[in-house]
Amino acid sequence: MDSPERSRFDAFNHAGADFPQIDPAPHNRPRPSRGLVTALVVCMSVALVLLLFLWAR
């Protein structure tokens, strides 16, 4: 029994050229490493706090 999500994915996968292909295989995309994401979040948080601190002075 297929879920509606799966059938929509198959519709994207087997569609012709006239059908817009948004992202036919999202699970094939390489995911960024966990450390990279964590570092990015930390950097953004520090930048935001610094910005707020400087703006409040």
Image: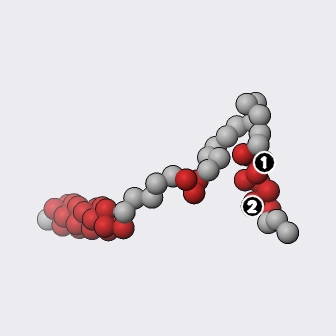
**Numbered tag placed on residue 5 in the rendering:** 2
Q: Nearer the viewer, residue 7 or 28?
A: 28
Q: Quadrant of the C terminus?
A: bottom left
Residue 33 image offset from top left, x and y in percent: 37, 63
Label located before the other in sequence (2 or 1): 2
Up-down relation of residue 38 to residue 17 (above or below): below
Q: Nearer the viewer, residue 43 or 10?
A: 10
Q: Residue 42 appears in which quarter of the rendering? A: bottom left
Q: Secondary structure at mark 1?
A: helix
Counting other residues with Cα less than 10 Å from the Cα at mark 2, is it few (<14), some (14-19), or many (20 or more)? few
Is residue 50 among what the camera can see? yes
Say whether residue 57 is left or right of residue 24: left
Give me the residue at 80% from left, 62% from top.
4
Q: Nearer the viewer, residue 46 or 42?
A: 42
Give me the residue at 75% from left, 60% from top.
6
In this view, the residue farthest toward the right is 1
Counting other residues with Cα less than 10 Å from the Cα at mark 1, is it few (<14), some (14-19), or many (20 or more)? some
Q: Residue 7 appears in which quarter of the rendering? A: bottom right
Up-down relation of residue 19 to residue 13 (above or below): above
Q: Nearer the viewer, residue 57 or 15?
A: 15
Q: Which residue is mark 1?
A: 11
Residue 3 image offset from top left, x and y in percent: 79, 66
In the image, what residue type sits under mark 1?
Answer: Ala
Q: Residue 48 appears in which quarter of the rendering? A: bottom left
In this view, the residue farthest toward the top is 18
The colour scheme of the drawn protein is: secondary structure
Say whether residue 48 is left or right of residue 10: left
Query: Disc 2 vs disc 1: Cβ atoms closer than 8 Å?
Result: no
Q: CA distance from mark 2 to mark 1?
A: 10 Å
In the image, what residue type sits under mark 2?
Answer: Glu
Give me the residue at 85% from left, 69% from top.
1
Residue 20 image offset from top left, x and y in percent: 70, 37
